[in-house]
Image: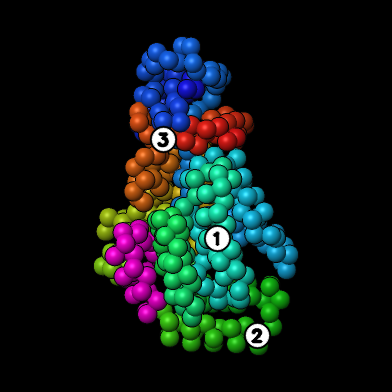
Amino acid sequence: MTLLTNARIVLPCSVVETELHFSTDGLSAPGAFVPAASTDATVIDCAGDYIIPGIIDLHTDNLERQVLPRVNARWPSRSAFLAHDAQCAVAGVTTVFDSLSLGDINGRDRIQTYEDGIRDLVELSEAGALRADHLLHFRCELIAPDMQPLFEMALHDPRMTALLRLASLMDHSPGVGQYADIARWRAGRAKEGMTEAEIDAMQARVAAERAHHLEANRAYVIEYCRAHGITLASHDDRLEEEVARNHEDGITIAEFPVSLAAARGAHALGMDVIAGAPNIVRGGSHSGNVNAIDLIRAGLVTALASDYVPSAMLEAAFACVAQDILPVPEAIALVTDGPARIVGLHDRGRIEAGRRADLVQVRLYDGLPVIRRVWVGGHRVV
């Protein structure tokens, strides 16, 4: 049993100054007296810090950055996974949806990361080597010729399918979604060192692959996820027509919509909207699309995701507070209760009696949130 005293407990609708008891069996009601706590508890004085639920990150590509810290410098996969796990934990992320790409229009780097990542996730989890709780988010690149074989690779191992809780439909073709501005897309390839002829060839190849594979891959993923109860998200929606089609196909989440119109359309249809936390921390989109803070001001966002910086989750939530856009409980819900609800994780995301003791102690320093302690399932991991 652990007893937190002198804490500001962030509840769904309020912040209360009280004590909190928890154990590996779960949380007690905030402020409730637990007889065993008087003699058996480890007592921690939180010195007025916030105690929030553990952060739930539905989309993180952070593993890719540990695997390839520099161009042509691939890191050993298990070492990279452990570094990724540690970075998530120290950022207060207690539930991580490892977002692995099924298909790569630029080569094989992401494919190898997927192949190594699903193996490492299962083996490291079974060994008890991970600090956070890791689940799978399959980022299905619909235009990739090898998307279906990569998907089926995981279906042969029930340990992997048990971890698969979310899939998203990706189309990273030039002229679509976040790459609707083809000139900007071409400029990006040029910065990577490609010649005009190479960019032309790539654009033509991707267009041909899109024409051949997109619809078949889309139907395959939707059918599998519908049959197995896996939550489905669209990705980088720009047009209301795209959102309407996704809704008709049973997709319940619009992830990272790149226009205000798409976000409004999704919200009007009762879909959940995920925005990128780095967009808020940086003050805008890195690819020139809609500003996520505007979506939050409009009341359109259900959850934030780290995308590529785990620490952005908490910082973005408190940025919403600092800018007087949201009160603390609503801001914290964007990284805790909101993500938990939309993927059906009903055992976490709130500080309530009986829920998992996934907790984060946070202190503000000059407006920035600083992680002091982190518990996962009642075990201290940071």
Counting residues from the N terminus, which is met first, the one under dot 1 or under dot 2?
1
**Residue 198 tag number:** 2
Judged from the image, the secondary structure of the residue bearing numbered disc 2 is helix
Badge 3 amino acid: Arg
For this rendering, which residue is in front, 142 or 313?
142
**How much space separates mark 3 and mark 1, taking CA atoms?**
26 Å
**Label tally:** 3
For this rendering, which residue is in front, 289 or 20?
20
Q: Is residue 306 above or below residue 208?
A: above
**How much space separates mark 2 and mark 3, taking CA atoms?**
52 Å
Q: Are marks 1 and 2 in contact (CB under 8 Å)?
A: no
Q: Residue at x 35, y 28 (%)?
A: 353
Q: Main secondary structure of the magenta part?
A: helix
Judged from the image, the secondary structure of the residue bearing numbered disc 3 is loop
The residue stretch that appears in magenta: 215-243
For this rendering, which residue is in front, 350 or 258?
350
Badge 2 amino acid: Glu
Q: Can residue 278 be seen by looking at this rendering?
A: no
Q: Can you identify the residue that label 1 sits on? A: 119
Badge 1 amino acid: Arg
Q: Position of residue 380 (x, y in %)?
A: 55, 32
Counting residues from the N terminus, which is met first, the one under dot 2 or under dot 3?
2
Counting residues from the N terminus, which is met first, the one under dot 3 or under dot 1?
1
For this rendering, which residue is in front, 236 or 78?
78
Q: Are marks 3 and 1 in contact (CB under 8 Å)?
A: no
Q: Can you identify the residue that label 3 sits on? A: 356
Judged from the image, the secondary structure of the residue bearing numbered disc 1 is helix
Q: Residue at x 55, y 54 (%)?
A: 123
Q: Position of residue 139 (x, y in %)?
A: 47, 65
Q: Nearer the viewer, mark 1 or mark 2?
A: 1
